[in-house]
Amino acid sequence: MTVDESGPSAPPAPPAPPAPLERIYDEGSVKRAVLDNDLEQIGVRPRLTTYFREMWRYRPLVQVMAVSKAEAENQNTYLGQVWSLVSPTINALVYVLIFGFLLKIGREGIENTIAFIVVGVFMFRFFERSVMAGAHSLQKNMNLVRSVQFPRAVLPTAGVLAELTMLLPALVVMCVISYLSGFLPVAGKVTIDWYWLLLFPAVLLMWVFSTGCAFISARLVAQTPDVDNLLPHVMRILMYASGVIFSVDRFVSQFSWGFLMEYQPVAIYLYLVRSSLLNEPAYPPDAFMWLLGVLWALLFSVLGFLFFWAGEERYGRD
Amino acid sequence: MTDIEEEVDFEVDPEDLDGAPVMEVDSERLSLLVNDLHVSYRVFGAKKVGHGPARDWGLLGRLVRRGAKQPPIREVKAVRGITFAAKHGEAIGIIGVNGSGKSTLLRAIAGLIPPVSGTVHVAGNPALLGVNAVLMKNLSGARNIMIGALALGLSRKEVRSRFDEIVDFAEIGEFVNLPMKSYSSGMGARLRFAISASAVPDILMIDEALATGDAGFRAKSKAKMDEIRESAGTVFLVSHSLATIQAMCTRVLWIHEGKLVMDGEPKEVCGTYKKFVADRKKHAQSQK
């Protein structure tokens, strides 16, 4: 190979490999070859209809990933799955103590503060965790993304479905706490009636909505990892703006923009769950709120899916 | 150089060799067509590209310079214009020194990294099997088989019917129900190979996976590769073991700094490559 021997001071050049084979196929002949051999171009975004069909075909994968993720969640602790019940309970109790009994903010216009806050915290936690699961879904499954080709929308969908799986036992705890709190002298009664069944469609709508949000957070974080650092703050603002621990309309109804806070999706879903579960006079079951709940769910799931699909070919590139 | 020209003569007209010759595709029984492929990826937090540590600016300098001159994101050009076509039934080895872009090329062919420019056309569904493709460490082998095989496009029924076959092939026995983080590296590699091969993909890409197995497993994986080739598939194999490449491949591509430098018979390409590596080693020693 080439060794420079011009002088003792000049270091010999490193050996070089053969010159690169510079060649390009003629475009016309590529087209012909593609047709002849029935080849498909890859590394490009699939058409929306194809993508949706593929996504439907991959739903067993969504299920298996969701269940696996839910199972693995608390694997490294002694209490294991019990934590998915204990930690939202502790979380809710902290808010009940601080906002319900020390600051008494949550008590304005609310008859059963404990049930009100517990429902708010449990349901908001589901939404928050879903958005975060979506945000981390691509990064956490990078190994899978970098080895197998499948519709990436599987990942955020599975992440949110895992949260839903973990929410179901927590819902039981939520109902039990709400019901029991009704027996306290300071709190209004919570009765069990057929309205409780509305809890399921309410959670279902919230799940569809959260999946849409997870699509959006997934693409944003995949493109700009910095968004991941902003998300907790956005979530914190949303939490105070959605009446998770106090009745927000009490505070905003005096402003002309108050309706924005009342009818934004997270507040709507909290309203729906509360109106199904609690006997609060301020939260009667309301057909208009249900309609809004359906609309928000459809809007966010469709827009979120489109938004995620539009970035499909870029996931896994970093 | 002469031997190379001879080697590519069936595809390139000699007068076209200067510059970037445009040529016709030999369009018989193609399974993969890569045309002028360029791939780059983003790296966050890189301050310097090249060898050696970055210059130390001191605390004040770092604060002042933050974001000033060097962007925190670098675009690394890993593949810079590669063109080739592969046929059904070929086993193609890819060799090259570390960082030459072999793995990136495979990922681009598998559709996992979108090209910056150029095109990749494939027949059927490519599957990439890499040493680092640890599926999910916290999950049991059984779950990983489920997830991996479903992601490869098998149906639930197919996965169930092939489950035992995969476990047997991977020789993991009762470890199948333990989380994958408890596996030895060899067990993990075997399981990944077994999962990837379970789908009988049209194009199987293996990224240095065989080096981890023992002799028995190597023989088995060679048999599996042959099986895929016989069912008209194409196999790509990235390895630093020239012996493995020569034993298993019918054609070898040599990638250097993101470009294709040789394409031909295993014996010939490996020979030239071996000489190049030896020269480099001698050169590095003489520098000391």
Image (tube, grey):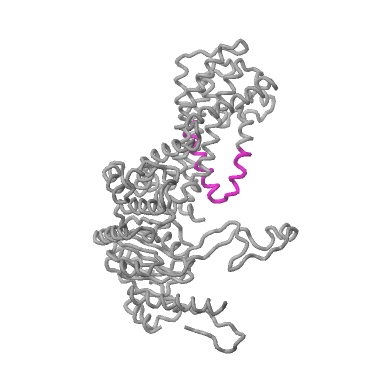
Q: Can the viewer see residue B13 in this picture?
A: yes
- Residue A230 colored in magenta in the image: yes
Image coords of residue B197 (percent x, y): 31, 54
Residue at the far left in the pictured view: B230
Q: Is residue A212 above or below residue B74?
A: above
- Residue B242 colored in magenta in the image: no
For the N terminus of chain B, which image quadrant? bottom left
Q: Is residue B199 above or below residue B266?
A: above
- Magenta segment's dominant SS is helix
Residue positioned 67% across, 66% down in the render:
B55
Q: Can the viewer see residue A161 in this picture?
A: no
Image coords of residue A252 (percent x, y): 67, 26
Q: Toward which corner of the image does residue A64 lie, by quadrant?
A: top left
Q: Which residues are magenta?
A: A206-234
For the C terminus of chain B, which image quadrant? bottom right
Image coords of residue A11 (percent x, y): 58, 82
